Amino acid sequence: MIIDNSNNAFDLFDDDDDIDFDNEIIKEFDEAVAKNSVITTSAEQTKNKKNNDVIRQVKTEEQQQKLLVYKSNYLVNASYKLSLNEQRIILLAISKLDSREEFCERTIQIKSNEFCDRFKIKKSDFYNTINLTLDSLFNRVVRIKNDEIKHEFRFISSKKYYNNLSYFEITFSNEIMNYLIDLKDNFSKYDLKHVVNFKNKHSVRIYEMLNEFKYKNIKKRVIKIEELKECLDLKNEYLRFNSFRESVIDKAVNEINKYTNISVRYNKIYNSSKYVEAIEFIFNFKYSDVENKAKINTDKKFYNKRKMEEKNSDIKAKKIGMGLVL
DNA sequence: CGACTAGCATCGCTCCGGAA
DNA sequence: TTCCGGAGCGATGCTAGTCG
């Protein structure tokens, strides 16, 4: 399993970067408050804190509106298997968590209407399958392992379906919450809208694996077939490479190209014999993302410049006030 | 000889239409 | 909103043929 700890999604920009941009602002506010703590009055500190709170609130509202999915990269690369509808439930529920908070409510309620609208599912199908889906989701297990840990746990610790009120409720397990909230580094995020049209259960996982690398300005990812199968919990399935390629890789690549902000192709990597050992995914952001990035970077430079000017004049004014500058 | 490809059959999940 | 039955499609396993 490849786990790279160097990723810090706050440092880079993409289509969802207005959120990161806010994060930058928060970071700058925090640093500015820390730096000027000696000469900042308590009233100003209160003002800074209020500004901070306002920004956090705006960010949370935007996050909710855009339904962003935040996941630790440990979870992105974990080994688990979910059906399409189980994936949908988990992703929609994750998008409703406030991932930046240290503590947040583990129980998420989802209305049947919202679920059907988001994923374009017929109501009749929803009622047909929801109980079975919740049952199977309740038993699903995540396996996370690297050199240091081997951790197994369930996605959810409880499930409820209210027949008459037409909504269901899941409670994330304690263990999985460690990989969903209070994420400070080594995590990925994406807009739920990119994956709602997927019809293949493996597309989400492969999209997430590519999306993780997106933040590192790396446009290639080589994954051993063995590792990929382990992540998708398909170790004893698709014994022939061709069926694995047809059913998993090709379908995921097609859906990712069709519905998401990533365009991707792949090459087969052979070992010494004719055996396919690994897949090299080569991916790129689509044009609109590059355009957005350019705009956001311009805005960011403008903002930083203005911020620096304000800060300098503020510090100078304080020093004058304290008689340190003539 | 080993790996890949193609075709076929079976099973299960998802989708669809209709009724209560 | 809920349930039922059937159709369609994907996942999977098996076999035979091809290729280097």
Image (cartoon, coloured by chain):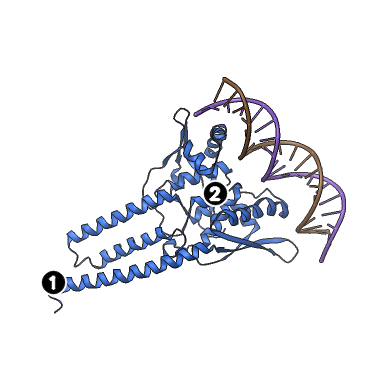
Chain colours: A blue, B brown, C purple
Residue A321 is tagged as 1
| Residue A199 left/right relative to B6 | left
Q: Residues within 10 Å of mark 1 (few under 14, many from 20)?
A: few
Work out whether residue B15 or residue A324 is closer to the camera in this orientation and state it: B15
- Residue A86 occupies which quadrant of the picture? top right
Work out whether residue A285 or residue A31 is closer to the camera in this orientation and state it: A285
Residue displayed at 29% across by 68% down: A307
Amino acid at circle 2: Arg
| Residue A31 left/right relative to A160 | left
SS for callout 1: helix
Residue A168 lies, in percent from the top left, at 46, 35
The outermost residue toward the bottom is A326
Q: Is residue A83 above or below residue A194?
A: above
Residue A101 in view: no
Amino acid at circle 1: Gly
Chain bearing tag 1 is A
